[in-house]
Amino acid sequence: MSSTYKRILVANRGDSAVRVIRACKEMGIETVSIFSKGDKGALHTRLADYSICIGDVQSKDSYLNAYNILAVATDYKVDAIHPGIGYFAENADFCELCESCGIDYIGPNSKIIQLMGNKIEAKKVAKKSDIPIIGEDCIEINSYEECLNHARQTGYPIILKAANGGGGKGIRVVKKEEDLFRSFELCQKEAEKVFGASKILVERYIEKAKHIEVQVLADQYGNVIHLGDRECTIQRNNQKLIEETRSHKLSEEIRNRMYQGAIAICKHIGYVGIGTIEYLLEDDKSFYFMEMNTRLQVEHTITEIITGIDLVKEQIRIAQGEALEITQDDIHFNGYAIQCRILAEYFNGSFIPDYGKITRFDMPGGFGVRIDSSYEANNIVTIYYDSLLCKICCHDQDKKQAISKMLRCLDEMQVEGVSTNKEVLISILKDTKFLEGDYTTDFLKTIK
């Protein structure tokens, strides 16, 4: 369609939907929100101009019901669908359905989503763009025998990944051969269940690494820029917990190589939209392409804070067919920002989701503080959706000052009715290794 949008359907829920709706309102665009029976009265339904129940409480009956969503989009004559974060945000089939209905999908086209959503094909793209990858092979594994042979060639430890995976799902680390068969079975079953495809990628497992990602913007006229890097090394169960920008420990030489690599990939495939190139960085300063996310990310907020650029608005403008009005020379990084994900869960050696009615929900504030949430007091945290309650972002001149601000915010925050990961976050932030940047993806194993 590629013209100025008058009405957008937001195909998501929670803070992701709230974020997009707010950007649309500021741009003068009407919004249509969808909700399940379990989200009746939720904040995103009240902020939108129109709000329609899309199905039952389970995601497969509502937020993942493509035909119901497209029926609403058609009925309300929307110009475009914004998939938000998660659900259909990297779904090539849904994007293709939108295209067939004459509705713009706010993101890259279906062929690009499919290409970069497959970890094996994405590695081939990186290799052609002269970006280092883990190992030399970019092959899919379809049987245990293939997996066993590849593991013996690679050497243990290895990591099994769903080829079409993401979000920390469909991943198993195998440290010895006797564990391979069970891990392969579990990984393949999870890949089939969550992503609808059982193809597996096998790689050498890098036990101690930093997780660095580069935010990019690209329009349909060949203009590609980066908006700096984020460090997402602090993770639990392969899912990010704390994100920072920019990384405290990157040399300018490595940083610039990562930036140029991200731009090279985008230019190589003719990428259009916002996206993120993810890398693993080893202690010896070797780094490797890991994957590309062809969507808005949870941690986009901290990039917005240090650059002053609204990524959702840029995403919408690009989808409308507009050229980027900013060049690389316009990008400046102001200070340091950190994001903590507040989750409904309790910790007793492992992270266990918690559910129930929120009886108190008091959020912090003050200079340099940003809160992204859709929850309020008396809302119900259900078993059906992600346990993310809110994102707290703090901005200051440097990492030390931003951490002090975040500790103050966590102390101010009061959530009752469900358990949160607040104490775990405080333990991480107070650790001297975190302050100095001397940590890798295995850091949470040291938290008791």
Image: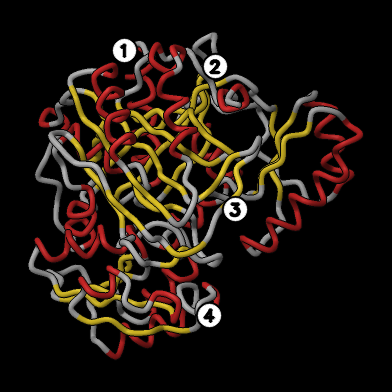
Q: Secondary structure at mark 2?
A: strand
- Mark 4 is surrounded, within 10 Å at the Cα level, by few (under 14), some (14 to 19) or many (20 or more) other residues, namely some
Label 1 – label 2 distance at C-alpha: 16 Å
Left or right: 48, with 106 as reference point: left
Q: From the top left corner, tell me how far across and down residue 383 is, in percent.
A: 56, 65
Question: Which mark is first along the chain, 1 or 4?
Answer: 4
* 228, 16: nearer the viewer: 16
Question: Which mark is first along the chain, 4 or 2?
Answer: 4
Residue 330 in which image quadrant: top left
Q: From the top left corner, tell me how far across and down residue 91 is, in percent.
A: 48, 63
For badge 2, the amino acid type reads: Glu
| Residue 252: image tag | 1
Question: Which mark is first along the chain, 2 or 1?
Answer: 1
Q: Secondary structure at mark 4?
A: helix
Residue 266 in which image quadrant: top left
Question: Which mark is first along the chain, 3 or 4?
Answer: 4
Residue 85 in which image quadrant: bottom left
User: What residue appears at the point 55 percent right and 21 percent down from the top-left corner?
Assistant: 209
Label 3 – label 1 distance at C-alpha: 32 Å
Which quadrant of the figure contains the N terminus? bottom left
| Residue 164: image tag | 3
- Mark 2 is surrounded, within 10 Å at the Cα level, by few (under 14), some (14 to 19) or many (20 or more) other residues, namely some
Q: From the top left corner, tell me how far across and down residue 203 is, in percent.
A: 69, 32
For badge 4, the amino acid type reads: Asp
Residue denoted by label 2: 282
User: What residue appears at the point 60 percent right and 21 percent down from the top-left corner?
Assistant: 446
Residue 107, above or below 145:
below
Badge 3 vs badge 2, beta-carbon distance below 8 Å: no
For badge 3, the amino acid type reads: Asn
Residue denoted by label 4: 61
